[in-house]
């Protein structure tokens, strides 16, 4: 599948270059990023060298919905231009992924590319998933209330309120 995708990207890049007479900006493949990776650098390449400076706007876009990664909580958003000086064909975009202590589902965001100068784009955006590295939350009840006298067959119900609290050091007690 990876070889087919690379071949497809190469064909797209070649057709864009031939059609417009400009190099194509080839975007990195989307993939899963671990929450504790810190800074992740993604390659962006030109299909061929250019005698002119090439640039493209790069923006992170938080999608809507329950699986969306949250800017400034899961990652630091980007909004700027990636520049290729004349003759240079490889650059990197570096994203800062933020690690938290919250057990959560994988969240995704889009890395969008627009406004190419002296080049064409093979894709407008790429989707990235941030995979959580935190274990599931646990509940520990240290004290049980003394049950009142109940008759056989009666049901005793306890109600507990649970708040989100910061994790504390594990003491090893169970």
Image (spheres, rainbow, N blue to C red):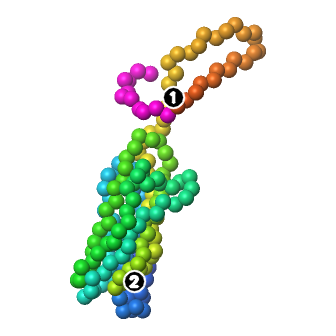
In the image, is residue 173 part of the stretch drawn in magenta? yes
Residue farthest top in this picture:
149
Name which quarter of the figure residue 58 lies in: bottom left
* Circle 1 residue: 139
- Measure the C-alpha gap from mark 2 to mark 1: 54 Å
Q: Quadrant of the C terminus?
A: top left
10 Å crowding of disc 1: few (<14), some (14-19), many (20+): few
Instruction: From the top left corner, tell me how far across and down residue 52 is, in percent.
Output: 27, 86
Instruction: From the top left corner, tell me how far across and down residue 123 is, in percent.
Output: 45, 76
Instruction: From the top left corner, tell me how far across and down residue 133 is, in percent.
Output: 41, 45
Name which quarter of the figure residue 24 lies in: bottom left
Judged by its main secondary structure, the magenta piece is loop
Q: Along the line of sight, which residue is nearer the eye, 127 or 8?
A: 127
Q: Is residue 132 above or below residue 165?
A: below
The residue segment tinted magenta is 164-174
Q: Along the line of sight, which residue is nearer the eye, 41 or 12?
A: 41
* Circle 2 residue: 120
Q: Which mark is residue 51?
A: none
Question: What residue is drawn where x is 23% and y is 83%?
Answer: 87
Question: What residue is drawn where x is 45% and y is 57%?
Answer: 129
- 2 or 1: tag closer to the N-terminus: 2
Residue 127 falls left or right of residue 40: right
Q: Is residue 157 above or below residue 63?
A: above
10 Å crowding of disc 2: few (<14), some (14-19), many (20+): many
Q: Quadrant of the N terminus?
A: bottom left
Residue 86 falls left or right of residue 55: left
Question: Element type at marker 1?
Answer: loop
Question: What residue is drawn where x is 41% and y is 21%?
Answer: 173
């Amino acid at each position: 599948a990876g070889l087919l995708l690379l071949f497809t990207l190469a064909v797209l890049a070649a057709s864009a270059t031939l059609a417009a007479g400009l190099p194509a900006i080839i975007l990195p493949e989307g993939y899963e990023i671990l929450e504790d990776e810190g800074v992740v650098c993604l390659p962006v390449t030109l299909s061929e060298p250019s005698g002119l400076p090439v640039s493209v706007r790069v923006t992170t876009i938080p999608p809507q919905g329950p699986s969306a990664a949250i800017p400034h909580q899961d990652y630091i958003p980007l909004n700027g231009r990636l520049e290729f000086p004349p003759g240079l064909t490889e650059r990197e975009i570096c994203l800062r992924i933020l690690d938290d202590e919250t057990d959560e589902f994988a969240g995704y965001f889009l890395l969008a590319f627009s406004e190419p100068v002296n080049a064409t784009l093979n894709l407008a955006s790429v989707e990235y998933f941030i995979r959580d590295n935190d274990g599931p939350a646990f509940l520990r009840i240290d004290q049980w209330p003394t049950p009142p006298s109940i008759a056989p067959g009666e049901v005793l119900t306890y109600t507990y309120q649970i708040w989100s609290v910061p994790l504390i050091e594990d003491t090893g007690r169970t």
